Structure formats: C-alpha cells, structure tokens
Image (spheres, rainbow, N blue to C red):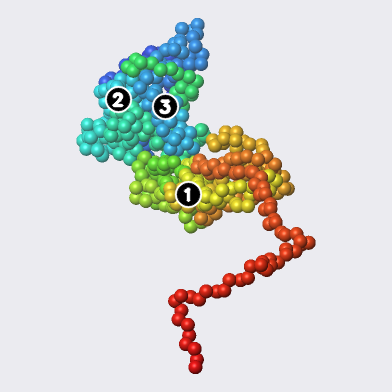
Amino acid sequence: MAAHMRRRLRKGATTTAVAAAAVAALTASQAPAATLADGSAGSGDPTAAGEDTASGETDGAATGNSPYYTDLPPLVTPDRPGSSSGLPAAGSAEAGIPASVLAAYKQAERTVASTDPSCRLPWQLLAAIGKVESGQARGGRVDAQGTASPRILGPALNGQGFALIKDTDGGAYDGDAVHDRAVGPMQFIPSTWASWGQDANGDGRKDPNNIYDAALAAGRYLCANDRDLALAADLDQAVLSYNRSTEYLRTVRSWFSYYQRGTHEIPDGTGTLPSTPSTPTPSPRPGTGSGSGTGPSATPTPKPSPSKPGGKPSPDPTKPGGGGSTSPTPKPPTPTPTPPSETFGSLENAGTGPLRATAGQEFDERVSVLARNAAGAPLAKVPVTFTVTGDTGTLFAGGTKTVTVRTGADGTATAPKLQAGEKAGEFTVTAVAGTGRLRTLTYAATVTARQADAIARTDEKALVAAPGEKFADAVTVKATYKDAAAAGVAVTATMVKDRLGAIDNDKGPYFEDADGEPVRTLTGLTTDAEGQLRLPEIFADDNEGTYLLRLTTEGGASIVVELTVEAPEETAPEEPAETPDATETPAPETPDATEPPAPEAPDATETPAATKP
C-alpha cells in the first residue's frame, strides 16, 4: 500500500475526499522514491480537485496544467536532524538540492530583487516548484552550463488524459510538431516560454531546458500582476497561475515550507528523484464511460436537478429574493488577464553614469531608466516620474524639481538635463513608475564647489607698511579655470610662516574682524563675476620684517604674497648758508692818491676825426 501510494496520483478521477486521504497516506508512508524515466517529466491526469482541462482550456497556466509529481516532503524536516524512528535524517539527499540547480534558484532571486524588489520572491518557492515539476532537474542531471541532459519533456498534451494543446512552436522546444509538451526543469509549455523566456546565463539563448534561464523565467512569471509573494494570498495566486490545481498548490506549499526550514547543497546528479510516473489513461468522453463512478474511466454522476425529488427546492416567489425560475444565476464574466507583453514588470537603470557637476554648471550625464514588461522585454509608453530631492538648488532644465516622461519604443525614458545649484553637496534623483505596486529607482548625485586651477595678482606693486600702520595698497588677485575667469570661487587668505603654508603666523600683518579684532585667517572670500577678488585692508603690528600671505582657492590653486613692515628712513636737515655780520660795514675801496689814473690810450685802429675848420 505504501509503495503504491508513493506513485504519482492520477488527478482526473480523484475526488477531493480521495485526494485528501492520499495526501495523509503519503505523509505517513514515506516510501522510497523511484527513479524518473529519462526524457519525461512525469505523467498523470492534470484535473486534480475536480478541474477539467481535457477540453484544452489551460487558463493561461505556465505549464498548461501538465502533470507533476505529488510526492510530499519527508516527515523529518531539515531543522530536526536524526530520529530514532528510522526515518531519513535531515542530511539525506531528499533535503538536498543539486549545486547548479540551487545556484540557479538563488541567482533568480537576486535578479528579481534588483528589478522588482517589491515582489519579494523567495528562492525556496522556485525550489518547491522545481521539485514537483521535474524533481530538481531530475536530481541535478545538468551540464556545466546548467542545461538538462537529456532534455526534460512532459507527455504530449493531446487531450488523452491531459489538456489538448496543439503545437505552437513547430517542435522547436519540445520536438513535437503536432501537440505541445511541457519543457525543461520548470516545465513551461512552448507558448508560455515564448512570452516569458529569459537568458539568465548570458549565452545569448533563451533555453527552457537550462535551469538558470528557466528559474529566472519562473520567478518573473510568479511576480506578474504586481504580486507581493510575502503575502500568502499573492503567493497562492502565483502558484495556481503556474498550475491551476488545488492539489498542486498543497504540494508546492508543503515543499516550500520544507525548504524554508533548511536545506543543503549536494553534487549535481545525486538528487533523489520522485516516484515513477504512471501511464496516463484517456479521459472519458461524455456517455462512454462505465463503472462505479470513482475510477479513471467512470462516467460522471449527474448533479441532482432542483426540479426533481432530492434536488434543491425551487425558490419561493413569495419571499424576498425568490423567483419562479430554476435557471442558475449566470456567473459574472471572468476578466481577461493582461498579456505579459502589456504588463509592466520592472524598472531598471538604463546605463546612467556618475552624476557630478560643479555648482552652477549643467550635468553632463542624464538619468535614464528602462521599463520591462512581465516577460522581461522592453515596454513602451510607461509614464516615469523623475524627482530631485535635496538642498543644493539643483533643478531640471526648465526650473522644475519633478518631470514625467513616457518610455519610448525601446522601453527607455530619459529625464531632462540637470542644472546644478550654487550650494555644494549631495542630492538624489528618484524615478518612479507603475500603478498599485510602484517600482522605484534612486540615483545619488553630487554638486561640487566652483574651482580654480590658477590664481595671480593683478599688479606687481610692493606692499609695504610702517609698524602700527595699514598697508596703503590693497591686495587684488584673479582666479581662472582652464584659462577662463573663475567666478564664485571660494578663497582662503592666511598669514603663514612658510611658502607652503604649513605653519600659520601669529604676528606681523593682520586683518580685522567685524569687531575690529586682529585675525590672520579669512574664509568665505569669493571671486566676483570676473574672477577677481580684492582683499580687505591689511594692518601691520609693531614687528618689522617680511611676512607671507597665502591665498588658496577651491580646487587647490594658490599664491604667496610678500608683505613688508619697516619704519621709513630718517633724512638729515640741510645746513643754512653763512650770512655776513650785520654790524660790520665794509669800508669802500679808495683810489691811491699818489697814483694818478693813466690816460686811456686811443685805439690804434681808430682814425682821429678831422678837425672842423
């Protein structure tokens, strides 16, 4: 009995009561699992819990409601190692997951967390689904790239015990050009894989037989429709979207809880396989079956008619809500689900580089995002709202802090250019998209202070002052950046003892603060629109000598200016000219009386004038 119950359950003829009893028996038996036949993912009728998929209706399930394994976890769970009952220990292969398979589940969890963090996909859910769909890729029989070898195929969905799904891929994935088959470790039917397939191992192919590609596709599929898998209701909906069977949900839930309590890695190819699949029996056609009503080919027992004895009484038309009609109340129409290609799935960085700019300048880089649909393809026409947050004064072009841009045909939306404010510091740009469960990306940005790479005096006058006096000439400098005037650049002025500015000076020239007190370092100085700066007045104390003033700009440019304090030179007064004594009157020189004046001799050249007659 135990060995029989560990075999795969046939779902088409299993009533709810029988299914419940089978689950209980499976839990109690713990019979060893049998090896899965190569090339098949299992068999059985996919109509558990009363669902009928033989008509071909798959309700959009990822697997087409194809068969799955119903083996339940061991009674000895990973957090209860060992037991005296002889049951498997926690370290058994049943609790382990093959290395490549486990790595694929965890990689898918990380990838989805980066693109759709609000989904909160746990890798243990992927492991639970992988267990019931393929026995963890048939115990980890995958190659070095994670591709199942041989490939994993379910039975033909030909309506004979299963759903009827005619070929949709020309046999490209499943090798069957007549009917579809579920393919790979996560058992996607080809039509679903066409929408949700992923390339998670970077080989340029979306291969449903590759555990990395299949695990990521399953993760994105489970997260569709804004699900938060940390919520029990959303998780149940996700699992049922994979295979619409309440028995399937119970089985997956059991393995999910099992793996949440702990598991471990085992080598590829050493995992325990589920029970050997049973051979499917064609589903009965109406009016052709016979039997007791409980076997696989039994004819369904007709439901009691409300108008016949034993049926539900007809409503009393004399009571509120009653009526004379026995026709059933029509069910409201089931909303048509949005195709994955039109469902917003994730928001990603579209290659935005570092966001840095100098105060007052325009950012070279622009914020860009990429919207993807639920299948991972670029999605157009998604409104994305970009918002600047911070106190640097940075705004988008046009002077706004918030803009909304729709994604283009390539799924990208790029915000307008950013104009840096005048205050240096950090701020953020946030991109938000989606309705209901929003997707958010946040970018860090920095505004750096204006800089100069050179500074020089505007004249060469010697700066000299007498002790206790102020310098008559002001110090004026000009800062430049890449040979252009550097406006708004912060400058620090410090009296120093050495040209490197390593030691401040505590004597000699000084500035005055607002209270008239001496200070030898000034901050908060800024160049004007022409890059020039005129320093405040400088005063000399009583110490003579040559002193150094060092000016340093934001950006590292510097200059050292000499200041001389010396007393002026003293000049000797001129001696006055000697003046004669006013009391002494010099005697006039008199001619010598004894020497008569000599007669003036006539000029030999002159002829005497003729004597008048």
Q: Nearer the viewer, residue 610 or 70?
A: 610
Which badge, 3 or 2, is on the more N-terminal residue? Answer: 3
Judging by the rendered image, the residue that carries numbered circle 2 is 145
Residue 106 tag number:
3
Q: Nearer the viewer, residue 33 or 483?
A: 483
Q: Residue at x 39, y 43 (%)?
A: 350
Q: Which element type, helix, strand or loop, lies under badge 3?
A: helix
Query: x, y percentage for residue 515?
Result: 73, 48
Q: Nearer the viewer, residue 394 or 330?
A: 394
Dot 3: few (<14), some (14–19), or many (≥20) neighbours within 10 Å? some
Q: Does 605 sit left or right of 284 as displayed? A: right
Judging by the rendered image, the residue that carries numbered circle 1 is 480
Dot 1: few (<14), some (14–19), or many (≥20) neighbours within 10 Å? many
Q: Residue at x 55, y 50 (%)?
A: 461
The quarter of the picture where the N terminus appears is: top left
Q: Nearer the viewer, residue 39 or 498?
A: 498
Mark 2 is on which residue type? Gln
Query: x, y percentage for residue 202?
Result: 31, 32
